[in-house]
Amino acid sequence: MLMLKRLRSTLKKNKKRNLITYTNPESIITEEFRTIRTNIQFTSEEHNCKAILMTSPSTEEGKSTTVANLAVSMAQQKDRVLIIDANLRNPRIHSIFKLNNSIGLSSVLSNKKKFTEAIKETNIGKLEVLSSGPIPDNPAELLGSYEFSRLLDLASQTFDVILIDSPSVLDYSDTKILANQCKSVILVVRNGRSKTEKVMEAKKVLKLAKADLLGAIINQVS
C-alpha cells in the first residue's frame, strides 16, 4: 500500500481551518495537500481511474476534511472536480462548504431530481459538490443500485476527478458496496487513533470488495 502522505494536522477542531487549502494557500499543510494531489495523479493515471472512493477504518479520523481540502487543491490546478458525499448516514461535506443539503445524492438515486439539477457550485475554481441530500431509510440499497452506477458514468463524462466521501469501512456495509463500484480507494487514518489491527482489517475488507487500494493518507496531530 502506497503511503501518499502524512499530514501534520487533522484540521478538525477549528472549523475556520476546515478548508485551509482555500483560506491559507501558503501554509505548510496546504503544500502537503499539493504533494498528496501529485501522488494521487501519478497513481490514478497508472490505474486509469477518475472516481476515487475515500474512506477510513473508523469514524472521526479526519476523512471528510481531507476529502474537501484535497478537492480544493485539485481544483486550484484547474481540474474540474466533483465531490460526491456518499455518506448517507452522517454527511459532512455540505457543512464544510456551507451548502444547502435539501437536494443531493439521495434525491438523484431515488429519481426525484436529475444529476445536473442536484450539483452545487462552490466558487472555488472548477470544484462542484453533490451533497448527500436528505438521509434515506435505505442507504445501502440506493448506493448499490443501477442509478448510482449510471451517475458515476455521467459524472466521468464531465469531470476530470471525482472524489467520493463514504462512511467508515468497518462500520457500515455501504462502503463495501461503494468500493466494489468505484474500484479505486484511498484509506484515511488518524495517527494515534487508528489501531493497526483495524487498518489491516479495513485493507482485508476492501480486498474482499475487489477494490484497488491506491494508498493511505495519515493524519497526524501537530
Image: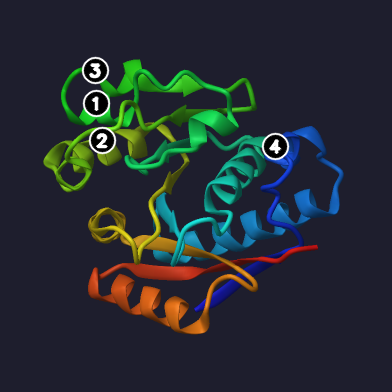
Location of mark 1 (residue)? 108
Marks 2, 1: nearer the viewer: 1
Instruction: Check the image and report above or below for 171 versus 110.
Output: below
Marking on residue 15: 4
The answer to which of marks 2 and 1 sits earlier in the sequence is 1
Q: Nearer the viewer, residue 131 or 182?
A: 131
The image quadrant where one finds the C terminus is: bottom right
Residue drawn 68% across the image and 40% down it = 18
Residues under numbered marks 3 and 1 in contact, where contact means CB atoms less than 8 Å apart:
yes
Secondary structure under the numbered disc 4 in the rendered image:
helix
Q: Amino acid at mark 2?
A: Leu
- Rounded to the nearest angstrom, the CA distance separating label 1 from label 4 is 29 Å
Location of mark 2 (residue)? 151
Q: Amino acid at mark 1?
A: Val
The answer to which of marks 3 and 1 sits earlier in the sequence is 1
Secondary structure under the numbered disc 3 in the rendered image:
loop
Marks 3, 4: nearer the viewer: 4
The answer to which of marks 2 and 3 sits earlier in the sequence is 3
The answer to which of marks 1 and 4 sits earlier in the sequence is 4
Q: Residues within 10 Å of mark 1 (few under 14, many from 20)?
A: many
**Horizontal side, residue 204 vs residue 3: left or right:** left
Q: Amino acid at mark 4?
A: Lys
Residues under numbered marks 2 and 1 in contact, where contact means CB atoms less than 8 Å apart:
yes
Location of mark 3 (residue)? 113
